[in-house]
Amino acid sequence: MSDGSKEFTCAVPAVTDHVELAHGGGGRKMRRLIETTFLPAFDSPAARERHDSAILPVGSEKIAFTTDSFVVSPLFFPGGDIGKLAVCGTVNDLACAGARPRWLSAAFVLEEGLPMAVLARVVSSMRETAAAASVDIVTGDTKVVDRGKGDGLYITTSGIGVVPSGVDVRPGRVREGDAILLTGDIGRHGVAVLSVRKGLQFAAPVVSDCAPLADLVGALVGAGLDVHCLRDLTRGGLAAALVEIAADGRATLEIEQDAIPVQEAVAGACELLGIDPLHVANEGRMVVFLPEAEAGRALDVLAATEHARGAVRIGSVSRGVSGPVLIRTRFGARRVLDLPAGEVLPRIC
Ligand code: MG
């Protein structure tokens, strides 16, 4: 600045006059936007739970209801595309409520000039992923915007699932003594997308973990395990999921860094890019909170499923108050884990 004054960065993001990319990044700015703008306007008991899906009573049954928009760039990446992502993201948010996903809607915003072959490829991918997740895409919408104003293709998917009786999965059920399980290695989705966007080359290609997770949740519930909370690790990564659950579930979490699996190529890419794998988005991973006594059996159940063969125990819940997430590093030191401050990786899902 010409007057010699200094700009400071602050721990609490300032309210800004305009929307920034970071407001969609899953970090502190997005959380603040939700708290200051959306929650006050749309307050309801279901919204106050701040869960991946709203759990709603319908007669004597409970349904889960959720929605998600997908703006990933590029549209295709190793291990997936915007269509697969749009189905998996919504299916996984329903699964994180303990629900069996049933029906999806799909709304398309298409840019004038998008090749029909691209659209056909995306739609075909959605059909295949929906079949793999045992959901039906039953309604939708199409809009077209002018050339140059849409970036090819955006998709919004909403979903409805049925919560089996007796299942109650939400941040408010996290308890002192709960074990925290992670369903596999982290960071692959974000690095896979970024590798295409930035033209990064690895010895072995990093493939997105993008996958529907309803089957593994069904296996946990079907085994009669008392699952307290689930959260898929999307924007903001494992760190954001844990920090949000600690805050919303009024808990202190203790995590062992060495227990968290990260592929060598992912760790290398993160180091190169100056980002923390704990903050990198995943699209086929979740954390599971349940009583310590059930952790061993839950790991066995997860290991037998297609998308959680590498499930591990990464930590535990230590106190039942709204507290920090403490991560023990490999040198024995403990640090407090926080939400990413800005935009780690824009347009990642
Ligand atoms: Mg989610």
Image (cartoon, grey):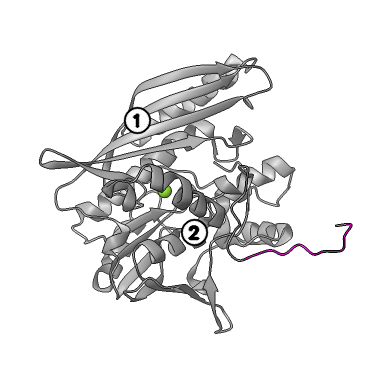
Characterize the local packing of mark 1: few (<14), some (14-19) or many (20 or more) Cα atoms within 10 angstroms. many
Bin the neighbour count of mark 2 within 10 Å (Cα to Cα): few under 14, some 14-19, many 20 and up: many
Name the chief secondary structure element in magenta: loop
**Residue 250 percent location from the top left of the image:** 34, 68
Residue bearing the label numbered 1 = 104
N-terminal of the pair, mark 2 or mark 1, is 1
Q: Residue at x 58, y 37 (%)?
A: 72
Relative placement, left or right, of 284 versus 27 is left
Residue 185 appears in the picture as rendered: no
The C terminus appears in which quarter of the rendering?
top right
Q: Is residue 142 above or below residue 174?
A: above
8 inside magenta stretch? yes
Q: Is residue 160 left or right of residue 224?
A: right
Residue corresponding to mark 2? 240
Tell me the quadrant of the picture where the N terminus can be found: bottom right
Which of the labelled discs sits on residue 232, or is there none? none
Residue 310 x, y percent position in the rendering: 43, 59
Q: Do we see residue 15 in this rendering?
A: yes
Q: Which region is colored magenta?
A: 2-10
- Residue 110's quadrant in the figure? top right
Pair 2/1: label in front:
2
Q: Which residue is drawn at 18% across and 58% down?
A: 224
The answer to whether residue 159 is above or below residue 333 is above
Assign a secondary structure to mark 2.
Answer: helix
Determine the secondary structure under disc 1: strand
Which residue occupies the foreground of this view, 187 or 60? Answer: 60
Q: What amino acid does circle 1 point to?
A: Leu
In the picture, residue 2 is in which quadrant?
bottom right
Nearest the viewer among 327 and 150 is: 150
